[in-house]
Amino acid sequence: MNSISNNSNSNTAILLMHCPDQPGIVAKITEFLYQNNGNVIYLDQHVDHQEKVFFMRIEWELEKFAIPQDKIAEYFGTLIASKFKLIWNIYFSKRVPRMAIFVSRMSHCLFDILARHQAREWNVEIPIIISNHPDLEPLVKKFGFDYRIFQISESNKADQEKKQIELLKEFRIDFLVLARYMQVLSDSYIEEFPNRIINIHHSFLPAFPGAKPYHSAHERGVKIIGATSHYVTAELDAGPIIEQDVARISHTDSIKNLIRKGQDLEKIVLSRAVYAHLQHKVLAYKNRTVVFS
Amino acid sequence: MNSISNNSNSNTAILLMHCPDQPGIVAKITEFLYQNNGNVIYLDQHVDHQEKVFFMRIEWELEKFAIPQDKIAEYFGTLIASKFKLIWNIYFSKRVPRMAIFVSRMSHCLFDILARHQAREWNVEIPIIISNHPDLEPLVKKFGFDYRIFQISESNKADQEKKQIELLKEFRIDFLVLARYMQVLSDSYIEEFPNRIINIHHSFLPAFPGAKPYHSAHERGVKIIGATSHYVTAELDAGPIIEQDVARISHTDSIKNLIRKGQDLEKIVLSRAVYAHLQHKVLAYKNRTVVFS
Amino acid sequence: MNSISNNSNSNTAILLMHCPDQPGIVAKITEFLYQNNGNVIYLDQHVDHQEKVFFMRIEWELEKFAIPQDKIAEYFGTLIASKFKLIWNIYFSKRVPRMAIFVSRMSHCLFDILARHQAREWNVEIPIIISNHPDLEPLVKKFGFDYRIFQISESNKADQEKKQIELLKEFRIDFLVLARYMQVLSDSYIEEFPNRIINIHHSFLPAFPGAKPYHSAHERGVKIIGATSHYVTAELDAGPIIEQDVARISHTDSIKNLIRKGQDLEKIVLSRAVYAHLQHKVLAYKNRTVVFS
Amino acid sequence: MNSISNNSNSNTAILLMHCPDQPGIVAKITEFLYQNNGNVIYLDQHVDHQEKVFFMRIEWELEKFAIPQDKIAEYFGTLIASKFKLIWNIYFSKRVPRMAIFVSRMSHCLFDILARHQAREWNVEIPIIISNHPDLEPLVKKFGFDYRIFQISESNKADQEKKQIELLKEFRIDFLVLARYMQVLSDSYIEEFPNRIINIHHSFLPAFPGAKPYHSAHERGVKIIGATSHYVTAELDAGPIIEQDVARISHTDSIKNLIRKGQDLEKIVLSRAVYAHLQHKVLAYKNRTVVFS
């Protein structure tokens, strides 16, 4: 088996935050951690000088940290966050995130994720895989995952979505990955999981949103195709972009070839986006993302 | 000086053609050249199986070719082209193409081209550089080129375009390169030079056509920017794409940075497109291009 | 399931050939096919002007072809190949290639291949998977493949290789894929399968051949890492390169990160190389390859 | 003219530093700046956990800074640097760096730099251009630069180098750029400018060091070529790498084509490296570099 497990033996806290830019923030936060014996092992910050917003991801070891884990949020909120109008989240490396995967009939993105899980490349639990088609059930079950089918029609959509949301809550799912899931989620569904639904779109957005982007790319005669992973928002294919990549094509590539080459992009781009999310390195702000190094 | 001159000592003919796909075309044309002692040094062909169209570029040495150069077009037209409903052009390597460059105030694309000309990387003549601004005149003149200023306003545009076209004809210009020229040519102007006006657009088309694409890219939060070189058609930024390339960016890049990084893309992409055109390797068909290897 | 199956309904013949460059080859071969009602659906040729060698891949439909399939090789050999000193192979699209995969303990390349097989992306049979470790057996069996373990030590290597070769012959294996197989094959083994063993090396060859290339890349401080797929020859990591690709890294990437990012390169590069080989598009010549479009 | 001038109106100080990693460094330095009204506009830091070394680049506005500019180094050295065993340099944005360019006969890298200078893309002075050949003199002089020729032979090399060093000192040159300068500098020359001589090598190092890398790349049959910009050290082509980039090639590319495509890589890679150096974003450590974001 691979030995590249996501360092799951680490015991750290991670703060992800943003606030109006102002002098002294880094000094104040790093001093707070230093004074309480929190050994910082990661710090990356960014100032958007146009929007005048400060962003930071900071991670420190908990072993000798003076504040008990269950009190950190309270202390940090009182002593630091309130003074700088911080919007923030705290994560702990010992807590393994729980991810639900949504698929339809194409398997390339799903298998890429399951293979990483199998090889312990990612530190994640996958309690459930949801689909609107039965096709992938046999194989997914061989891998040992729970596969639930929700066939969706115009008439039952609202009802099926309600049942899915209940199931996701029952399984305490942290975030959703749409691995070429061919259904559009309703707005109310999306609002249940703000910046916690990751989609892969098979084009270099904002070019070719919507259906059949490879056909459109072929029609337009582009020399490069792409794939885009983004958080899902109410507007289709318009949410904050997490990751993109491209591949060179030429006039010799038929639409079939574009689809074949594109699928490799899709699975790699989606997996990179999910990995960044799992590392708590993505911060969405005003329909853009900060993806820390 | 660079020794990579475009092999200007060669004495070859180049046929660029397309026609309805049908059996025996390659056999017929290669046999025609073989029977007349035309040593083929390049052959690339492509069949668009969807459109059922055959495309080919073939190049052969003229030295021992049995048909005199000024008769080749006639013989080929009579003996071959008419039978296969070929649409074709013939070029001779000894004839140096004549290019006009259009610029406004940004110099990066222009200088990249002039530097290649200076280093004899390209086999091209540049009889004239046209601009709607005087800014770059001093520098261009130091390089020894003819620089003509046509200031364009809403009221004089038709008149100025007419004068430009006369000048281009007077100088026997083969094709135009818009090197970040910030004027839209009128339809009648474009019709004078079908598939002979090469533009560089500072985005990954079809994303962000029109003005200020770097601002739009920043606003949309893309993770990759691009540049696109295409033949100019009546619809803005919608002509057949010759070449595209991209560069990875991140949230740390300000709009200024996007512009800076993008300019490197623009000049390289435009120069690649111009080079392919100079080599007679680009064939436009139905708003797409075949760019031979 | 994916619908991008390798067009297995097609019924074509494919010729892959090279010979000393000389006038009239293309004319002669295309005429031969045309006269016998062979509709050409693919033609790509290349002349190495330095070595004076002509290379071609040509594919035509068999349906109306005048020469019976089992006579094509004889006729072509007699009427064409002997006259031009062609070195050539013929393949038929109806014949599904048989591939053996070799693995050790890392699963990423293997799973990438099995997922493509499962999704019918490739037209290939995988009668056997060979390993020197038992680790991946349970999973491979779930996929329904035959997994054979050959533990290799210095003392038993010759013997185990002999048994492997017998097994490969018994299964009528066409070519071998070393999917991060951590054993060096002996020269005599390699000679049994000339240009029919495809390896993936986890560096941008010729940089960092041999063991631990990611450690070497980190030590050297490169800004880009790569992966290389090549045919195996007697000299380690020095065979004809089929495909390479790269990924940008930075000082922030630990060796662990290089390995993680590199594994994505490895699996994609290996799969691209295997796909090209399956399409009969790779021709090795003098330690280089021609990879047709 | 371009308006992307390197923000030369800014009035900032930049600290570039490294030291043994230890708790509290960021807190101490950011607190020091905050207490003295230094508004931080850039902070990027990196910890090499393997080497246990801390690296940082921090930039702050001088306008309201409490410590006079000519005292900053003294105060910072006494109050901070000595306590953390910092190795550090301070730069001021108002001080325009002075660069010498070395060329031989190829113009592509030189012209790319001069065009950027002309367009005010970079905030740099180029007091002198040194060459071992007269070829580029006429054009460089038209641009208005000082061009000095030092013909180098085995017998006069030591003497010529001595004269060059004197000239560089007389012109108070900060750093040297070898823009395809085809002479190897002696060790003593290099020692005069540690990590202040930037070279461009026309391969993807460590592949193909030394002479004629494009010939070697063609011979080896690689599918991708590259270029590498690095600081010059005593060992040829082995110094700390600042920037690399690559381009895809194929069997259709002759050596001439590799050279042509490679020259575009060379000029862009070199210019990116020089720009990073000008921004004081490169920190060399143990034959690797940290290139801040």
Image (tube, coloured by chain):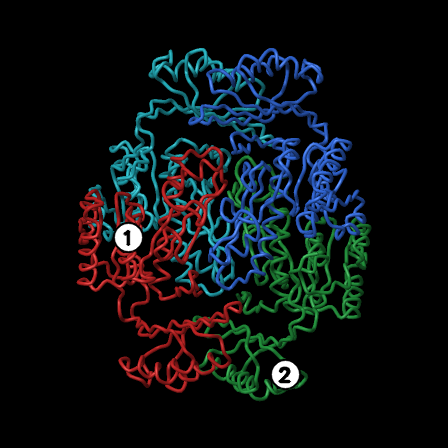
Chain colours: A blue, B red, C green, D cyan
C54 and A289: which is toward the camera: A289
The label shown at residue C244 is: none
> SS class of the residue under badge 2?
helix
Q: Could you tell me which residue is drawn at 43 percent across and 32 percent down?
A: D281
Q: Are marks 2 and 1 in contact (CB under 8 Å)?
A: no
The residue lying at 44 percent from left, 63 percent from top is: D253
Q: How many numbered markers are drawn?
A: 2
Circle 1 — which element? Answer: loop
Looking at the image, which residue sits at the far front? A155
Q: Which subunit holds the residue at mark 2? A: C
Say which of B244 and A36 sits in front. Answer: B244
- Which percent across, then down, holds residue A93? 69, 28
Q: Amino acid at mark 2?
A: Ala
Residue C140 percent location from the top left of the image: 78, 53
Residue underneath mark 2: C73
Q: Looking at the figure, which quarter contains the N terminus of chain B?
A: bottom left
The vertical placement of C26 against A110, above or below, is: below
Residue C205, percent from left and from top:
55, 54
**In the rendered view of the protein, which quadrant contains the C terminus of chain B?**
bottom left
Label 2, label 1: how far apart the Cα atoms are: 58 Å
Question: Along the horizontal axis of the image, is A171 left or right of C282?
Answer: right
Residue underneath mark 1: B185
Does residue C38 show up?
Answer: yes
Host chain of mark 1: B
Measured from the top left, where is residue A158 in percent x and y? Answer: 70, 38
Q: Amino acid at mark 1?
A: Leu
The image quadrant that residue A83 belongs to is: top right
